[in-house]
Image: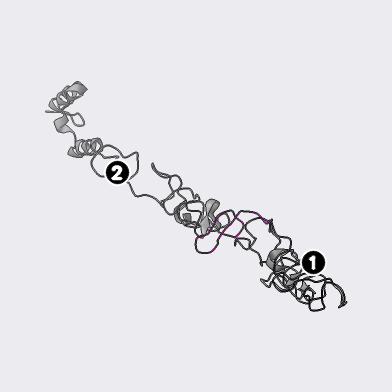
């Protein structure tokens, strides 16, 4: 019969056996199943981009506009990418010739290298005097403000009558009249072939005094003026004396 308050000897012996068992004898069969499941899940986590291949280090492709400069992009300002700003909608740094007008720096951008259209090099609007001939608009453009060369500041070739004295011209009164002081852009003179209104009565374009128009007065040749009008007068002694060898009708006596 056991004394009250004392544990049975068989229970104490069993406890000693359990305490004395080495920890290595505990098998994994006694571990909760949730531990092994959690470890397996962590070992198979994919840290890539979700497509099953190696981790993605170059971006997923078309990321322009996400605010992160990826491979193949020159810039990326996210929502601030703009066709009128420093970073274009293509994620390229704005440059003349890209087809985008960078406000404040470019006046135009037609995405070509032509200097004969409305937008020339350096993305400037074509203008008379820029040195480029705009097709269908300008006839010439020498890139200067000199009115006295071959191309005026209106980008048209210089010509007599444009009001600008060019090389080879003595005058230019902005008209094509030949009876004023400046016919054919030369100063009027007797013998130039142009009758100077109010000054000359005739002008046959030569310096002869023996034809119908006497030089250098540019007046008609008449009997008694002292100039023989060849083919019309036989003589002309410039007087009205009937007793000399030349009658008053300019015939020989």
Is residue 88 placed above or below 3 in the rendered structure?
below
- The circle drawn on residue 216 is 1
Q: In terms of image quadrants, where is residue 133?
A: bottom right
Secondary structure under tag 2 reads: loop
Q: What's the CA distance linking mark 2 and mark 1? A: 103 Å
In terms of secondary structure, where does tag 1 sit? loop
Q: Is residue 129 magenta?
A: yes
- In this view, the residue in front, 60 or 211, is 211
Kindly identify which numbered label has been placed on residue 49.
Answer: 2
Left or right of residue 138, residue 223 in this image = right
Residue 207, by quadrant, is bottom right
Q: Nearer the viewer, residue 113 or 246?
A: 246
Q: Picture coordinates of residue 91 (x, y %)?
A: 43, 49
Question: In this orientation, which residue lies closer to the viewer: 170 or 227?
Answer: 227
* Residue in front for this viewpoint, 81 or 212: 212
Q: What's the magenta region?
A: 127-148
Provide residue 236's location: percent of width, then percent of height. 80, 71
């Amino acid at each position: 019969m056991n004394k009250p308050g004392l544990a049975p000897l068989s229970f104490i012996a069993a406890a000693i056996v359990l305490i004395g068992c080495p920890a290595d004898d505990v098998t994994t069969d006694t571990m909760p199943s949730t531990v092994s499941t959690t470890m397996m899940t962590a070992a198979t986590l994919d840290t890539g981009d979700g497509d099953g291949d190696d981790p993605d280090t170059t971006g997923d492709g078309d990321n322009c506009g996400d605010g992160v400069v990826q491979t193949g992009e020159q810039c990326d300002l996210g929502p601030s990418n703009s066709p009128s700003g420093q970073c274009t909608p293509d994620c390229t740094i704005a440059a003349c010739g890209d087809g985008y007008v960078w406000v404040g720096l470019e006046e135009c951008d037609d995405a070509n290298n032509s200097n004969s259209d409305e937008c020339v090099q350096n993305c400037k609007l074509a203008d008379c005097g820029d040195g480029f001939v705009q097709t269908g608009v300008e006839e010439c453009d020498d890139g200067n403000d000199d009115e006295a060369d071959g191309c005026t500041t209106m980008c048209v070739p210089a010509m007599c009558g444009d009001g600008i004295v060019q090389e080879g011209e003595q005058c230019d009164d902005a008209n094509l009249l030949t009876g004023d002081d400046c016919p054919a852009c030369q100063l009027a003179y007797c013998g130039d072939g142009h009758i100077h209104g109010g000054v000359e009565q005739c002008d046959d374009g030569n310096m002869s005094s023996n034809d119908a128009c006497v030089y250098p007065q540019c007046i008609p040749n008449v009997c008694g003026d002292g100039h023989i009008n060849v083919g019309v007068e036989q003589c002309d002694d410039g007087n009205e004396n009937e007793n000399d060898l030349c009658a008053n009708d300019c015939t020989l006596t």
